[in-house]
Amino acid sequence: MTLIKRKITGNRLRRSGKWFFVYAIMILLVAFTALPLVYLVSTAFKPLHELYVFPPKFLVQQPTLRNFSNLLLSLSSSAVPFTRYLFNSVVITILTVGGTIFVSTLGAYGLVKHNPPGAKRLFDIVIAALMFSPYVTQIPRYLVINAMGLINSYAALILPSIAVAYNFFLIKQFVEQFPNDLLEAARIDGAGEMKIYWSIVMPSLKPAWATLLVMTFVSTWNDYFSPLIYLNSQALKTLPLALNTISGGGSSIGRAGAVAAATMLMTIPTVIVFTLMQRKVMETMMHSGIKE
Amino acid sequence: MKKKFRLTSAQRHALTGLVFLIPFLIGTALFFLYPTVTSLLLSFGDTDDTREGIYIIFQGFQNYVNAFTQDTLFVPKLLDSVETMLIETPLTVILSLMIAIMLNKVQGGKGVFRVIYILPFLLGTGDVMSQLISEGVDDQVLSLVSNNVIPREYIDYLSTDLLTAIDTLFGIIVKVLWSCGVQTLLFLSAIQSISPALYESAYIDGANQYEVFWRITLPMVSPMLLLNLIYTVVTAFTAVDNPLLEYIKQLGIEQSQHGYAAAIGWIYFAVILLFVGVIALIVGRYSRKVKTA
């Protein structure tokens, strides 16, 4: 027994001797992965002449706050107040995130734990949808939204992003690991189906929908393409579109600095949301994970 | 309950499931199934622009034939996408597995490392990343040559071809590092679900790190390997800077060649399906072999 013990600790020590090496590689890799963020922040503080240096310099040489004051200036000169764009983005993001979490968890729970007829076929459709690029169906989808009379409304951006195959798939993997005994016990105690979903399934799926929350938040908040096609009205535009307007469609040289500043500010909410949710997200991945 | 509606408890149970699925079904039918079927029909013809709504003038396989015989841009762009995928997928999977193994070993600062690894993903899905890539951050900014990482005197000794090759490789690795956050997390979850007793007994039996990796870690994570491979292939094919997707977007939306754009999209889908199928076959066979062994 003592021999085994000594051997195990010996192994641990041998492994711990490599810690320094492992840390060194990790820090090197971190340096690389952090690059986009560093570049983003440093570009926001670059004076105009540094923005157009070729090849681009990675770090700012003479940091300036001018970009931010320029941004404020061009925001105050626009016909629609900036807060309106912010409001649009916030409303669309919250409704999309809430909607997709509700629809995916409810549907995945119904599919896995109630096994309705045709469940397998539906799942095949979901798998196929995972591989399908949205661009291909963009035109027919536009026609559907047009026929529903949703062009130029929040609904045109929210509704298509609620029933998403990927989100459904993610939640389904977690629901599958949920113990049936717990549901049976609740049923015997007389809990209704909706009650079971809301008070038992949802709290246990917290890590799963926290992951979904982060992913959907990031993609909706940053979405540039959908608002571009479905919205014409200036007053309904979201932040990424407004950003593009500020930059003069990417052609105005003088405003490149303001765009860099705005881009940096745009990413702050996503980083905050991730940092707040990260512990829960990691729990998902670690404890239940996606298992076959 | 009325007699007419009397159901067995199993039927009622299944019905509840169906009711819960209704919102998802409606959404999928409206915004995925219907557009998908329409785009398939559209790929065999073109829209009739003289009428309101979708009226398709059928032309048989004309669009598909044109893609390979008339269009000089399509085939190179398709091959380009396949090439990028073939380079990036193995790199992404190997790197993310390596990082996951290291993350699993590191004791302090685990949370910090994890947050940083996922950061590019937070920027990655949006406009920000495509902007960064279009500005050439991945290969230009970090270029060894232009940033004087290697002193000029040494560069002269190396051939320019070699330097360009190193720079390209560097750019690819950086891009891969930025896109492997999700895969790393999935691998990490798989590694952490391996029983520590398995490792302990292997070490007691005198196995070295190398053997432990090939005999324990890799077989145990093989289900996740399949999922990660598929995920990586699909994301590589549908990345923000994919040239073929940009081409489809340009054809379908800017040039209003709806039928042709749909046909190219379906060819692309078939190619993706082919690769995913081959991977599923190979890795599936490996995991089965592991399970029976």
Image: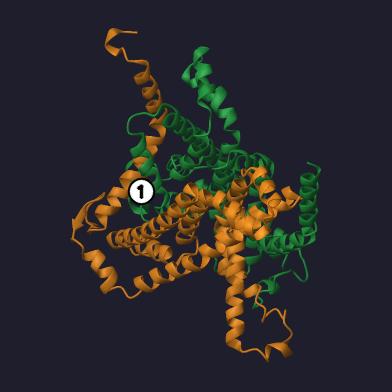
Chain colours: A green, B orange
Question: Which amino acid is tagged 1?
Answer: Arg
Relative to the observer, which residue lies in front, B78 or A10?
Answer: A10
Query: For residue A200, what is the image quadrant?
Result: top right
Up/down of A194 relative to B216, above or below: above
Image side of residue B285 versus residue B154, left or right: left
Question: Dot 1 lies on which element?
Answer: helix
Up/down of A109 relative to B244, above or below: above
Locate residue A127, reporting x and y percent. 40, 46
Query: For residue A258, what is the image quadrant?
Result: bottom right
Up/down of B144 relative to B177, above or below: below
Relative to the observer, which residue lies in front, B221 or A195?
Answer: B221
Give the number of marks. 1
- At 33% from the left edge and 59% from the top edge, which residue is drawn? B270
| Camera sees residue A78 | no
Up/down of A252 relative to B116, above or below: below
Relative to the observer, which residue lies in front, B168 or B127?
Answer: B168
In what quadrant of the picture does the N terminus of chain B appear? Answer: top left
Instruction: Say which residue label 1 marks.
Output: A141
Q: Which residue is the extreme one toward the top? A: B2
Locate residue A283, reporting x and y percent. 64, 40
- At 60% from the left edge and 54% from the top edge, which residue is drawn? B181
| Camera sees residue A153 | yes
**Dot 1: within a 10 Å radius of its alpha carbon, few (fewer than 14), some, or many (20 or more) residues?**
many
Q: Which chain letter goes with mark 1?
A: A
- At 61% from the left edge and 69% from the top edge, which residue is drawn? B138
Image side of residue B51 versus residue B203, left or right: left
Locate residue A220, reporting x and y percent. 53, 47
Relative to the observer, which residue lies in front, B103 or A191?
Answer: B103
Locate residue B163, reporting x and y percent. 62, 83
Image side of residue A259 versus residue A98, left or right: right
